[in-house]
Image (spheres, rainbow, N blue to C red):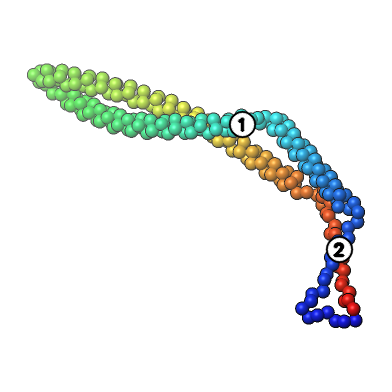
Amino acid sequence: MSQPEPNQVPPTVTQSLKPPGSQPRSCLRQITGFIGWLFTLIIAVALTLTVAGGFLYWVGVDLTTPQQIRQASTGMQTLQMVATDQAVKIHQLQTTQAQLVGELGSARERIDELEVQASELAVVATTQASYAATAVALGRSLQTAVAENGALQDQFREGQVLVAVVATVQATQNERIREVERRSERLIRFLNRLSDIAGDTADDVASPTPTSITPIPPTPTMTAQATPTP
């Protein structure tokens, strides 16, 4: 037997040994497994959506819930603006009340001074008749001051009533704001919980089972070795 030449590469023959009919069967199994997995996924998603829809219908959540949340948020902002305006009005009324209290105190001091002067003039009038006209003028001034004091007291009472009414309205608005905030928080927590449940369900459904797709076995190949020619 002669040895092959140095520059001559021995020919290699590669022959793939495939059992007849194995490739179509493996493709058919793969397609069948994929269709079964897809059908299982569709059924699982349909069941999940049905259960989620039934649960949402049972708890009273419908397609208008996001709109209701937006409306509630808008209403809460409006109520907050109204509460702010009421607070500004209350501050203004409190300032006015403080001014009225100061004016009322000044009027009372003036009344006290006029009363002292009237007492002194009354004593003098008993001894000197010439001071009668002055006493009458001071009496008229006293009556005017008393009338002004009565008007100031009426304004003060009206201011107190208005402050009480505004405080009642503000308390009602604050209670409504707190109720809207509590409802919004409960609804947001419920939607977040429902979103987490839906996400977990989608993750569980999206992960295929180990038996859903049949793995394709590797095709054996055989390499024929060349026999050196004599």
Which residue matches tag 2?
15
Rendered residue at 21%/21% (across/down)? 142
- Using the image, determine if residue 28 lies above or below residue 92: below
- Using the image, determine if residue 120 lies above or below residue 15: above
Quadrant of the rendered structure where residue 45 is?
Answer: top right
Instruction: Give the residue type at disc 1.
Output: Thr
Where's residue 80, x and y in %? 47, 33
113, 158: nearer the viewer: 158
Where's residue 128, x and y in %? 10, 20
Quadrant of the rendered structure where residue 86 is?
Answer: top left
- Using the image, determine if residue 29 lies above or below residue 75: below
Residue 25 appears in view: yes
Say the numbered circle drawn on residue 219: none
Q: Quadrant of the C terminus?
A: bottom right
30, 41: nearer the viewer: 30
Rendered residue at 84%/67% (across/down)? 13
152, 185: nearer the viewer: 185
Which residue matches tag 1?
65
| Label 2 to label 1: alpha-carbon separation | 67 Å
| Lateral position of residue 106 relative to residue 44, left or right | left
